[in-house]
Amino acid sequence: MEFNLQSFKEMARQLDALNRKIDQLVDQTHSEYGSEVMSIDEAAKFLKLTKSTLYKKTSLNEIPFCKTGKVIVFFKKDLVEWLKDHRVKALGSFILQK
C-alpha cells in the first residue's frame, strides 16, 4: 500500500473525528452515571446493610462493584439490578392446587 501526503492528512482528519466522538461518549457517560456512583457508605445506606457486610460481599464477589486501588465504588444501576436478581417470590403469588 502506498501512502502519500494526502492519505496521511485524511488519516489525521479521521483520527481527529474519532477523538471528538470518544470525548463526546466519555462526557455522556459521566453525565449519565456521574451522580449514580456511590461510595461504600452511600451503598450501605441504600441497601440497608452494614459497611462490614458490604465489604464482605465485595470480597466474596457477591455484589457488583468497581475498585481502583483501595477505593471501592458502586453504580446505583448495578445495585438495583442486583436487588432485582435476588428477589424472593412470595408463596402467595403461586396458586396451589390439590
Image (cartoon, helix red, strand yellow):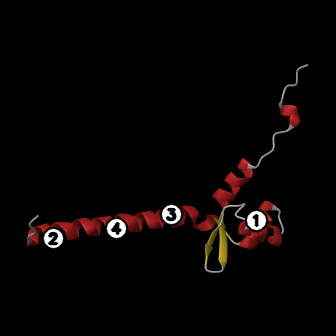
Label number found at residue 13: none
Label number found at residue 29: 3
3D distance between C-alphas at marks 3 and 2: 30 Å
In the rendered structure, which amino acid carries the disc numbered 3?
Thr
Q: Going from the N terminus, do you reach mark 3 or mark 4 first?
A: 4
Query: Can you give x and y, in whole percent of width and height, for residue 17 in the image?
Result: 28, 65
In the rendered structure, which amino acid carries the disc numbered 1?
Lys
Label number found at residue 9: 2
Q: Do the CB atoms of the residues marked 4 and 1 lie less than 8 Å apart?
A: no
Q: Going from the N terminus, do you reach mark 2 or mark 1 first?
A: 2
Mark 2 residue element: helix
3D distance between C-alphas at marks 4 and 2: 17 Å
Q: Position of 96 compared to 39: left or right?
A: right
Mark 3 residue element: helix
Residue under numbered circle 4: 20
Q: Quadrant of the N terminus?
A: bottom left
Label number found at residue 57: 1
Nearer mark to the viewer, of 4 and 2: 2
Q: Do the CB atoms of the residues marked 4 and 2 lie less than 8 Å apart?
A: no
Foreground residue among 26 and 68? 68
Foreground residue among 61 and 87? 61
Q: Going from the N terminus, do you reach mark 1 or mark 3 first?
A: 3
Q: Going from the N terminus, do you reach mark 4 or mark 1 first?
A: 4
Relative vertical location of residue 91 with respect to residue 97 in this rendering, above or below = below
In the rendered structure, which amino acid carries the disc numbered 4?
Arg
Count numbered badges in the picture.
Answer: 4
Q: Position of 64 compared to 5: left or right?
A: right
Q: Going from the N terminus, do you reach mark 3 or mark 2 first?
A: 2
